[in-house]
């Protein structure tokens, strides 16, 4: 596959290039986040908002009223931060799955990993796991691991079968898990199932300190673990046999990376729901822009994924205001056509 050729000399990421591009994207993420905080149905002064964040600076309009401060600090800011964390998580996970499967169509949502996490989260709600601090995220992680094991178990371990059937298997597993969740909804009158609907539609409105804490911790731990294997990912995309000859412990690397990707996906899904296609669109576009070297691709996917989902959630809040769309609707409207375009190009390449 041409999209996964080993980086040539002009695409190899130097430390200076990684730092420079990462800082630029980090600045872009901050700018987009601030713009999202300023945007909403409530007309709040930008100068007053800046005064709230930077009280040492002097702004003619003064500060926010108590109601405006509550809207900014308790509703918009946590939601924007969670969108950035979830977008980064799904994007980095998408990089891992696309590299391990050597397929640009791989994505946590398409492979059924997000749906598996949603099943775990819903079961956690029904079993009362929310009484424990990490009960629901833990159940979501178990659901993600179950989905990964199911997809890989059905697709088989042979290389040819894996590359040709794994995506289709993921689609079927995704459909099964979603059907299971709908079945649970239809036979249960559990009062908390209304909350569980958020895992189906994708919703960032329930952002709070708890969800921000554990999703950010899991994202940092998982991303550091994944980035430590960036060189191994560069070798794995050339083929498992070649990577093994160059000293990569293929099976160990696959297990560690799949577990890390499942961890950050599960944390994201448990906080925001099944938001699809972020891990498909962002890594693929970045691979075309910055090259396939994962030492650069992983950090750029981290920040760009955050930018993408913050923008998508802002659109979800504003397009039909004062009503609100699930953010998963926006990402699906972007991702589904892009997936079909990639599929058409892949089929053309294979023929």
Image (cartoon, helix red, strand yellow):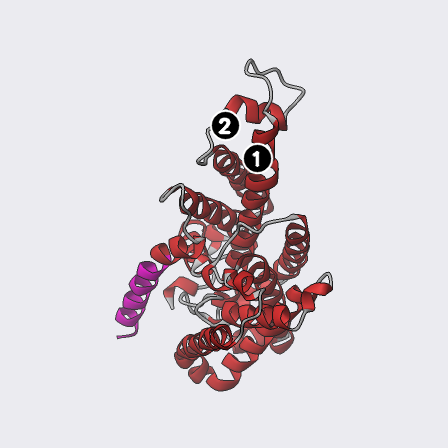
Residue occupying image coordinates x 46% and y 35%: 39
Few, some or many C-alpha atoms within 10 Å of disc 2 (few <14, some 14-19, many ≥20)? some
Residue occupying image coordinates x 43% and y 83%: 160
Q: Are marks 1 and 2 in contact (CB under 8 Å)?
A: yes
Per the image, is 349 magenta?
yes
Q: Relative to residue 293, is residue 264 drawn left or right?
A: right
Q: Which residues are magenta?
A: 335-351
Residue 56 seen in the current view: yes
Q: Position of residue 79 (x, y in %)?
A: 55, 45
Q: Which residue is mark 2?
A: 44
Pick the front one: 286 or 249: 286
Determine the secondary structure under disc 1. Answer: helix
Q: Position of residue 44 (x, y in %)?
A: 50, 27
| Residue 181 versus residue 95 in the image, above or below | below
Residue occupying image coordinates x 67% and y 48%: 209
Determine the secondary structure under disc 2. Answer: loop
| Residue 74 versus residue 11 in the image, above or below | above
Q: Main secondary structure of the magenta part?
A: helix
Q: Which residue is mark 1?
A: 72
Tell me the quarter of the image containing the C terminus.
Answer: bottom left
| Residue 254 versus residue 334 in the image, above or below | below
Q: Relative to residue 247, is residue 107 drawn left or right?
A: left
């Amino acid at each position: 596959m041409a999209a996964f050729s080993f980086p040539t000399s002009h695409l190899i990421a130097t430390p200076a290039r990684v730092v420079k591009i990462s800082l630029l994207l980090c600045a872009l993420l901050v700018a987009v986040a601030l713009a999202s905080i300023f945007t909403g149905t409530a007309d709040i002064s930008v100068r007053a908002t800046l005064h709230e964040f930077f009280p040492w600076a002097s702004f003619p309009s003064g500060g926010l009223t108590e109601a405006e401060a509550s809207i900014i600090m308790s509703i918009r800011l946590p939601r924007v931060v969670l969108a950035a964390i979830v977008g980064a998580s799904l994007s980095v996970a998408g990089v891992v799955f696309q590299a391990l499967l050597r397929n640009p169509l791989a994505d946590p949502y398409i492979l059924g990993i997000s749906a598996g996490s949603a099943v775990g989260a819903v079961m956690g709600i029904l079993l009362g796991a929310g009484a424990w601090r990490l009960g629901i995220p833990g159940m979501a992680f178990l659901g993600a691991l179950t989905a990964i094991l199911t997809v890989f178990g059905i697709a088989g371990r042979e290389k040819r079968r894996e590359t040709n059937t794994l995506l289709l298997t993921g689609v079927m597993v995704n459909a099964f898990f979603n059907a299971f969740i709908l079945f649970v909804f239809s036979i249960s009158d559990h009062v908390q199932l209304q909350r569980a609907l958020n895992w189906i539609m994708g919703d960032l409105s329930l952002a709070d300190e708890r969800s921000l804490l554990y999703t950010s911790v899991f994202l940092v731990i998982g991303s550091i673990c994944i980035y430590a294997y960036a060189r191994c990912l560069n070798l794995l995309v050339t083929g498992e046999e070649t990577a093994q000859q160059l000293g990569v412990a293929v099976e160990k690397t696959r297990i560690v990376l799949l577990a890390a990707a499942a961890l950050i996906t599960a944390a994201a899904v448990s906080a925001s729901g099944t938001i699809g296609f972020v891990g498909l669109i962002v890594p693929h576009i970045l691979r075309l822009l910055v090259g396939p070297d994962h030492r650069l691709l992983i950090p750029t996917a981290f920040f760009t994924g955050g930018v993408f989902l913050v923008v998508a959630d802002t659109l979800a809040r504003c397009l039909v205001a004062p009503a609100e769309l699930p953010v998963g609707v926006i990402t699906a409207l972007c991702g589904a056509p892009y997936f079909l375009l990639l599929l058409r190009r892949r089929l053309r390449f294979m023929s």
